[in-house]
Amino acid sequence: MDEQRRRRVAVVWTAFAAVMAYVTLAGGFAADASDLLGAVAVLMGLGLAYVYYANPNGVLNFGESDA
C-alpha cells in the first residue's frame, strides 16, 4: 500500500473517531454500556489511524519488497 493511500485512510479513521467521540459525548458520559462501547470505538479508530499513518515495522507492506 503506497504512502499517500495510507495517509488518506488514516484521515478517514481519524474522522470516524472524531464523529464517534461526538456521538458518545453529546448527551453526556454516563459510563453505561453504550458510552463504553462508543469509547472503545473511538480508541480503535485512533489505533487504526496510527497504524495506517505510521506503518510500524512495515506491517502494511504485506510482503512487498523495496527492490
Image (spheres, rainbow, N blue to C red):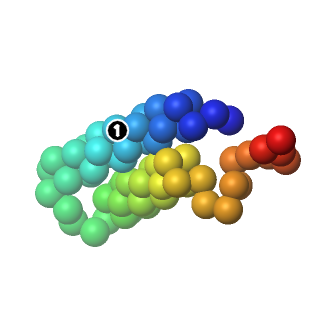
Work out whether residue 13 or residue 60 is closer to the camera in this orientation and state it. 60
Would residue 26 be found to the left or right of residue 52 on screen? left
Q: Total number of numbered labels? A: 1
Residue type, mark 1 in image = Ala
Give the residue drawn at x 21%, y 65%.
Answer: 30
Q: Which percent across, then down, holds residue 19?
A: 29, 40
Would residue 51 be found to the left or right of residue 8 on screen? right
Quarter of the image for residue 58 reads: bottom right
Viewport quadrant of the N terminus: top right
Q: Please, what secondary structure does the residue beneath circle 1 have?
A: helix
Give the residue drawn at x 29%, y 44%.
Answer: 18
* Residue indicated by mark 1: 15
Quarter of the image for residue 43 reads: bottom left
Q: Is residue 44 visible?
A: no
The image shows residue 46, relative to residue 19, as above or below, that is below
Q: Can residue 62 be seen in this view?
A: yes
Would residue 4 be found to the left or right of residue 14 on screen? right
Work out whether residue 16 or residue 49 is closer to the camera in this orientation and state it. 49
The image shows residue 64, relative to residue 46, as above or below, that is above
Residue reaching furthest to the bottom: 31
Q: Callout 1 environment at 10 Å: few (<14), some (14 to 19), or many (20+)? A: some
Residue reaching furthest to the front: 67
Work out whether residue 31 or residue 57 is closer to the camera in this orientation and state it. 57
Q: Which percent across, then down, holds residue 67?
A: 83, 41
Q: Which percent across, then down, holds residue 11?
A: 40, 37
Give the residue drawn at x 20%, y 62%.
Answer: 29
Q: Which percent across, then down, holds residue 37?
A: 42, 58
